[in-house]
Image: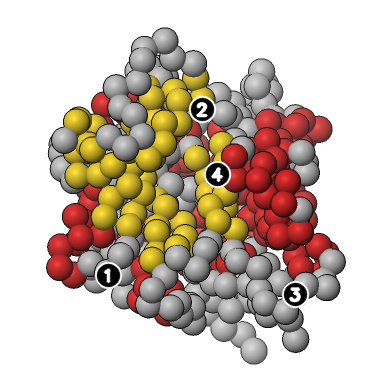
Amino acid sequence: MPHDHDNHLDPMEARVRALETILTRKGLIDPAAVDAIVETYASKVGPQNGAAVVARAWTDADFADWLARDATAAVAEMGFAGRQGEHLQAVFNTPEQHNAVVCTLCSCYPWTLLGLPPVWYKSPAYRARIVSHPRAVLAEFGTRLPEATRIRVWDSTAELRYLVVPMRPEGTGGLTPEALARLVTRESMIGTGLPKVPA
Amino acid sequence: MNGPQDLGGRDGFGAVQPEANEPLFHAAWEARALGITLAAGALGHWTLDESRHARESLPPAVYYQSSYYEIWIRALEVLLQRHDLIDADDLAAGDAAPGPAHPKRLDPARVPAVLAKGGPTDRSLTAAPRFAPGDRVVTRLQAREGHTRLPTYLAGRPGVIEADRGGHVFPDTNAHGGGEQPQRLYTVVFQGGDLWGTDAEPGSTVSADLWESYLEHA
């Protein structure tokens, strides 16, 4: 059925297409480079990287220790380095302290480990309230923590990027790192969620 | 500047609304916006700090009504014109006369290497640190019109130095053509009660990474 948008472009679609045309014609960008950037974040760099790091930390005590001391070097050894992951710190959840990450001033996020941030991470609602009402915001994600667990929020105001290392779920003793990685959700590595529990 | 980006602790934005099975991009233009922004940044005419300042300098009503990629595109148009790479006539026409390739135009073959290299901001310093882990500090008041990375909700507040992160490029100068002027960066921990008073959730803390000139001994 025809509808209002059949005969014209969405305003942002038109605006971005025009800008890409201008930049290409002026010799400032090569559209193939734009394709390559998009392809990198669509298929190569995403939360599967961070999940592999967490699963390895759960199963390799020496690696977990390295990750705690120098996350940038530890994950570089796994091949994860680059833009928006130049300086990394891993923060480990414990029964006493749960960690959550935000960038109240923009959208800083550990791209090398988690890929591009979801819309909610960049939204005013999250950036405004996770620092003032962290427990309430976690509840909006369905994440309820014991009252005795303190919540620490890490505001990414500089170029350090934070990876939350959630606690390993109970009942996962026999799982391989690959199977464990499938339990590690993006939200559990930002701190708004917890890992999945095995079915 | 305490512009529209300075969101920590603000009321009125409602509940967080995570989207189930969120796609990586919500429209084709978002993917192009990402790629264009990064490719244009690679030309080297502005710093990441200047691009952040361009985004936070959008009028508040525009900032809040825009999706994040729209904020990027609007700021990119500002940066490209400020640095004389395009002009208003180009934007009005949606097209431009062909020009020679920019000497730093990002080569598609170099994209993986450029993204893997990133842009580290750590710098060596000769000055001794003014603060050590455990020191009690108070942050300066937020009173700068230009770019800064001290959020208003953390301005004029007491905290404790947790970690010395070494020298890092100083955004407050680097955003405005003032050079890197690296300063020591510290992770500072704030108690919820010192930020939100009696409304604070019990036991909550917030930390931020703050440059030395943002801090004084308490």
Q: Amino acid at mark 3?
A: Thr
Front residue of A22/A125: it is A125
For this view, does B192 lie left or right of residue B48? left
| Foreground label between 4 and 2 | 4
Residue B201 badge: 1
Labels 2 and 3 positioned on one and the same chain: no
Q: Nearer the viewer, mark 2 or mark 3?
A: 3
Read off the residue under disc 2. Answer: B121
- The answer to whether any part of residue B50 appears in the image is no
The x, y position of residue A188, in whole percent, is 58, 67
Residue at the bottom extreme? A1
Q: Secondary structure at mark 4?
A: strand
Q: Are marks 4 and 2 in contact (CB under 8 Å)?
A: no
Label 4: chain letter: A
CA gap between label 4 and label 3 equals: 25 Å
Chain letter of the residue beneath label 2 in the structure image = B
The residue tagged 4 is A89
Label 4 – label 2 distance at C-alpha: 15 Å
Residue type at mark 1: give it: Glu
Query: What residue appears at the point 57 percent right and 29 percent down from the top-left corner?
Result: B120
Q: Which residue is mark 3?
A: A172
Asked where in the image residue B41 lies, by quadrant, the reply is top right
Q: CA distance from mark 1 to mark 2?
A: 34 Å
Chain identity of mark 3:
A
Residue B127 vertical position relative to residue B19 in the rendered view, above or below = above
Decide if residue B94 is on the left or right side of residue B17: right
